[in-house]
Amino acid sequence: MLLMLFSIGTNYAAGLGISYFLERDRSLSKIVLGVAITVNLGLLLYYKYANFLVEIVQEFGLYLEYDHKSILLPIGISFFTFQGISYLVDVYRKETKVQENLFHLGLYISFFPQLIAGPIVRYHDIAEEIRERQTNIPLFTEGIIRFVRGLAKKVIIANSAALIADQVFSLPGSEISIISAWLGILCYTIQIYFDFSGYSDMAIGLGKMLGFNFKENFNYPYISKSIQEFWRRWHISLSTWFRDYLYIPLGGNRKGLGRTYINLFIVFFITGLWHGASWNFIFWGLFHGLFLILERSKVLNTGKWPIFVRHLYVLVTVIIGWVFFRAETMAEAVSYLGSMVGASGGENVTALIYINPYSITMIVLALVFAMPLRVWVNNMVAKSESRVLTTVYQTVIYFFYIGLFLFSIIELAQSSYNPFIYFRF
């Protein structure tokens, strides 16, 4: 709490300073911005990356007197740090007015629905709603439905898939058969999408209940036909944040192909590092960056491939990337990839212990709901222009979500297994 209050106070004072000097001496305004960003990133560097940096130094044979146990990672620091930086940069760019009310800025930085799990909300997107927002029954109802959808994603689908993924990844590499390995990473692929997007849905739903309209954070990323498209659909608030506050300031694609590739490399190095202080996360970021460069350079000219092949290429690439994201170390990730191609020699019969009617049902539901089926049905009903059909459809939807909510509560009550994967980040 003290750290968050310090962050709020620092960004409030810096915003006032940036705004004041903008009309008098832009160079001083830039200095204030630079100092404030340094303070924000300094907090993030100390609390999130100090242990990792010390480990790197010690790998080079240098000993540091250092008590790593005294540094605890504050919940939500990555999110509220990035939100603070985006506010300051937007004030400097004159894309938003400075917030002179300390409590209003404090509300923006500490807003509880999305504080610990995203999405990253831009200040200028909700500035008007912070000042004066509208709450009404239709918006509140929409928020409830959105929240229940996210809760069900997390509790019913993500947790069910996580149970299998955690069991497979906990096995020694030599015991993981090829079928178990693919089952484990498929379940993790399901878990991470429905967990991340589920929390985003809950945050967006809570925001609507309180009169705030957050932008979408996930748009069915697993139906993508290229890695570029995947990143336009996956964790949209993060990818657009890096685009607007890192990639474009670095020069974007305006300074030739070579500089564009370097900028992409830097952005995805930082993207991986942002997710966690580990070589695994860094490799995962660079892995995606490499494929973006290959696609942009037309070495991988996916636009000429059959659609099925393009979908398959994206899914296989993303799944291989998730191995590094999920494994604790690089050695574990490499060993797991070996199991996926049958190098471990594990018994395939062991995979059967993870298969039961419930897990199969959850996996099938996950595959179905990873596609825009709901959007398609909504559009079909809207095009029909039939009041009777619309009324019946809305009634069915309301009862469906009531049942979904009750089933989610039952799942939470009867199971002690409810992983919070954001602790790793």
Image (cartoon, rainbow, N blue to C red):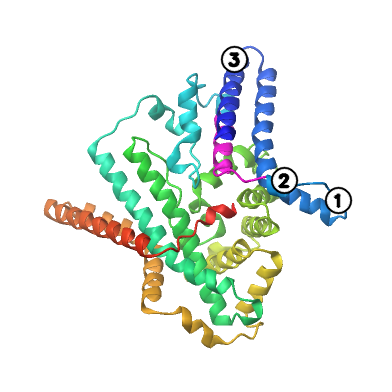
* Residue 63 disc label: 1
Camera-side residue of 272 and 12 = 12
Q: CA distance from mark 3 to mark 1?
A: 46 Å
Q: Is residue 74 above or below residue 27?
A: below
Q: Which residue carries the number 3 mark?
A: 20
Q: Is residue 115 above or below residue 135?
A: below
Depth check, mark 3 against mark 2: the one in front is 2
- Measured from the top left, where is residue 35 in percent x and y? 69, 27
- Measured from the top left, where is residue 151 in percent x and y? 37, 55
- Measured from the top left, where is residue 269 in percent x and y? 68, 51
* Residue 50 disc label: 2
Camera-side residue of 250 and 346 = 346
Specify the quadrant of the image occupied by residue 38.
Answer: top right
* Residue 301 disc label: none
Is residue 93 something that shows in the picture? Answer: no
Camera-side residue of 327 and 251 = 327
Is residue 76 shown in magenta? yes
Q: The disc labelled 2 sits on which kind of residue?
A: Ala
Q: Do tag 3 and tag 2 residues touch (Cβ < 8 Å)? A: no
Depth check, mark 1 against mark 2: the one in front is 1
**Farthest top residue?**
24
From which residue to which does the magenta span run? Answer: 71-87
Q: Quadrant of the N terminus?
A: top right
